[in-house]
Image: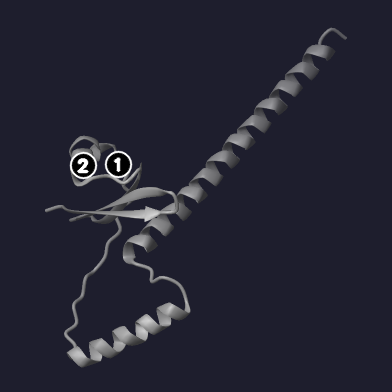
Amino acid sequence: MVHIKATIYFEKKFWVGTFERTDKDGFAIAKHIFGGEPTDPEVYEFVLTHYQELQFGAPKEFVLEIKRMNPKRVQREVRREMQRMGETTKPSTFAQDYMREELEKKKLQKKQKSSAEKQARKDEQFALRQEKKKERHRGH
């Protein structure tokens, strides 16, 4: 069974949609920039027509554990957390952590790929120089 959750929010200048997919493989997320504020029918149409084009990251396993707590204790912890949030930054959700990890993975892959391409280019240029050197000395 697959569960999909779409969240639309305003980020800097654009409206961004995050699509969270939870299935037997794990949790994955994809991000899409809408530009202007999308209406409900536009989001629905986007999901129907362009869902296959979304690039979800690698599935990440997670375990959801629910603890039962005293309601007053929960209230106190929420109040403490809200005070701590006011002092620092926004809280990080599982989806935000996942997107951050995926971004780091993509950066590392891009760096490795560009490094390999750069090395291949250097090797090719070296081979070309060696070939030209042999051509110059062939007749003597």
* Amino acid type, mark 2: Val
Q: Is residue 88 left or right of residue 8?
A: right
72 or 108, which is in the foreground?
72
Where disc 2 sits, the SS reads: helix
Q: Is residue 126 left or right of residue 1?
A: right
Q: Is residue 129 left or right of residue 43?
A: right
* Amino acid type, mark 1: Leu
38 or 17, which is in the foreground?
38
> Looking at the picture, does residue 105 appear above or below residue 44?
below
- Cβ atoms at labels 1 and 2 below 8 Å apart: no
Quickly name the residue at label 1. Answer: 54
**Residue 57 visible (yes or no):** no
Where disc 1 sits, the SS reads: loop
Based on the displayed image, in which of its 4 quarters is residue 50 positioned? Answer: top left
- Quadrant of the image containing the C terminus: top right
Residue depth check, mark 1 versus mark 2: number of the one nearer the observer: 2
- Residue under the image location 18 percent in, 89 percent down: 71
> Looking at the picture, does residue 110 appear above or below residue 83?
above
- Residue under the image location 78 percent in, 12 percent down: 135
- Residue under the image location 30 percent in, 41 percent down: 54
Quickly name the residue at label 2. Answer: 47
